[in-house]
Amino acid sequence: MNPLEYTPRRVDFLGALTVQDTKLKIYSLISPKYGAAPLPGMDKIAQLLAPGLPDPKLEADHKIGFGILHWANDGLYTLTNTWFDANMLRMKAFKIDSFESDTPEMMSLDHLNVITCVWELEIYKYERDLWVRQVLAQNPASLTDEIVAEYLSLGFNGYV
């Protein structure tokens, strides 16, 4: 069980990555407990986020979203998020034994009915506001390559 206390955590936007057929913005979120946690390479990050891609894939999936690697006080987590049907977000989260393992053990958090933690919520808020500004407020007939590239190029860095 986590204690009822709050200590800011560092968020870094690591750029965009194609995971299978989905373009994801990648974030690291690190508790001070870990100091400067070693980041896995992009191939490893793709492997860690792939199990969280939507299943089943639906026609209204935009194949665009963001992933979070979270070094939390109570363990390591991955969260994969993809935009769906204009204004909804699909998400899958896992607790993971190691970000470095060749065959990491990943436990789905579906059974907990957890949405996200307070630190991750700041990333979600940023991404929500960005999706509204960069996509929905423009009222595009479709997602153009230009809109997608602009959205994927923007990310949050700082403490939450």
Image: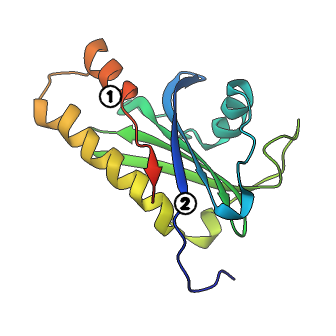
Q: Residue at x 27, y 14 (%)?
A: 146
Residue located at (71% from left, 55% from top): 35
Left or right for 134, reference 88: left
User: Is 10 above or below relative to 38?
Assistant: below
Badge 1 local density, few (<14 within 10 Å), some, or many (20+)?
A: many
Total numbered circles: 2
Q: Amino acid at mark 2?
A: Arg
Q: Secondary structure at mark 2?
A: loop
Q: Nearer the viewer, mark 1 or mark 2?
A: 2
Q: Which image quadrant for residue 96? A: bottom right
Where's the N terminus, which quadrant? bottom right
Q: Position of residue 147 (x, y in %)?
A: 26, 21
Mark 1 or mark 2: name the one nearer the start of the chain: 2
Identity of the residue drawn at 35% across and 45% down: 127
Residue 38 screen position, x and y as percent = 75, 41
Say whether residue 81 is left or right of residue 152. right
Taking 67 as reference, is 24 above or below it? above
Q: Are marks 1 and 2 in contact (CB under 8 Å)?
A: no
Which amino acid is tagged 1? Tyr
Q: Which mark is residue 9?
A: 2
Is residue 91 visible in the rendered structure shown here? yes
Q: Which residue is mark 1?
A: 151
Residue 76, by quadrant, is bottom right
Residue 63 placement (x, y as % from top left): 44, 28
Gap between marks 1 and 2, in whole Å?
A: 24 Å
